Amino acid sequence: MPNRGMIRRSVAGVVLVLMLTLAACAPAPSPTPAPSPLPTLTSTADASTPVPTVSAPNPLVVTLTLWVPDLFSPYGDGLAAEVLAQQMDAFAQAYPDLQVRVVTKKAEGRGGLLDFLRTASVAAPSVLPDLVILSTADLQLATQAGLLQPLDPFLREGLAADRFPFATALGQVGEQTMGVVLGAEMMHLAYRPDLLPDPPITWTDVISAPAPFLFPISGPGGDVTDAFLCQYIASGGDLLDEAGAPTLDVMLLGDQLLFYQRAVAAGVISPTVVAALADTAATWEQFQAEQAALAVVNSHQFWSVRDPDLAPAPFPTRIGHSVTIAEGWVVALVAADPTRQSQAMTFVEWLLAPENLGAWTQSVAYLPSTLSALEEWDVTEAERATLEVLLEGAMPPIDPALRAEVGPPLQAALAAVLEGRRTPAEAARIAVEAVRQ
């Protein structure tokens, strides 16, 4: 490919010949116009962010638009903004004919990314972005609304093998890949190595090491927590029967509830303490205050702090099998023009490069979606091994309708056992009957 110097010299030669020809034909020379100012190729944000003025744009440069949630803005202070801004600058240098204009918006709700996509698709299609970063929940809704384009024709060979299974599933809607997961969050265990040299992997481990264990009893709206639901699934428990109806296994659930009863008897779980924990944020606050040796934590909170006195671990389960539920953020394609689609996917591939995805996900404290990006994280080998176990064992969220059927009965059963109102067998039977009704 000719370099820029060769191109400039060729253009200059052509211009010189034309000028000499015109000078010979013209009756008199005319004043030379002042040169146009060079364009400033920068990223931009929404109305809440100061936007540099772009003058005299170069027609040879294609401007792609990327909408991102405000928590991923490259315009603020802090490491996360700095890392993304540096990666965008590096992309501009590697692809001088492409520039990326970043627009930040609310992550969700009214005035959020999905809301703007829906509105603009009807009222002002010309302002739609080429790419958008959405939550995995909004990816489903945006696809159903016909706002996104399938990605399968553009994904590089080898990406499927590099992605963790949950990431492949989260990016799919039906049989098509509608988004590529960038970063994920999930619940997992955290423990204090100074009190527990080894993480408790099984229920027996938890009871045999009488160290205080913190977790919220219920999730939002009285739903079951991810931790309790994942422990049931890790034991081999089904949520659907052969006919596709919601179900629970009374024996497996009874064994799980028996573990919690024994943990209370061993002093590992204090029913009054865990009942007072409204959510994982309250649990994290108590855990940081050194009120326990074990706690169920949110990965985003845990990896945002990187406390050297704390270590990650999978949930303790009946036989040590790791299961957790992952959600996260995906990049999706909006552009319908084939040429712009190809150009936009050039930037997506840049984001997915292991060194870029690894650095960015660690800076924003979301877990990477690929093994190669995980290998770029600056963590200890023990932490990397734990993260790999968590990510390999992660699964996409349970269907909301199914969770609404099984969640409340599971939560009620746990609360009844912890409060001493029911035996594990009684609580399990009542939960199973509630789901079957």
Image (spheres, rainbow, N blue to C red):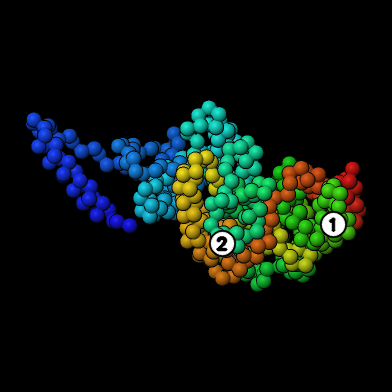
Neighbour tally class for label 2: few under 14, some 14-19, many 20 plus, Cα within 10 Å: few
- Position of the C terminus, as image quadrant, is top right
Q: Mark yes or no: residue 223 visible.
A: no
The answer to whether residue 27 is left or right of residue 237 is left
In the rendered image, which residue does mark 2 sit on?
158
Image quarter where the N terminus lies is bottom left
Q: Secondary structure at mark 2?
A: loop
Amino acid at pointer 2:
Gly
Asked if residue 434 is positioned above or below residue 237 in the image, the reply reads: above
Q: What residue lies at 45% left-to-right and 41% top-to-bottom?
A: 65
Front one among 125 and 238: 125
Q: Which residue is mark 1?
A: 253
Q: Say which amino acid is labelled 1.
A: Leu
Q: Quadrant of residue 324?
A: bottom right
Mark 2 or mark 1, whichever is nearer to me:
2
Residue 23 location (% of width, % of height): 11, 37
Q: Position of residue 360 (x, y in %)?
A: 49, 55
Of residues 8 and 34, the one nearer the viewer is 8
Closer to the N terminus: mark 2 or mark 1? 2
| Vertical position of residue 59 compared to residue 123: above or below | below
Q: Which residue is the extreme one toward the left?
A: 28
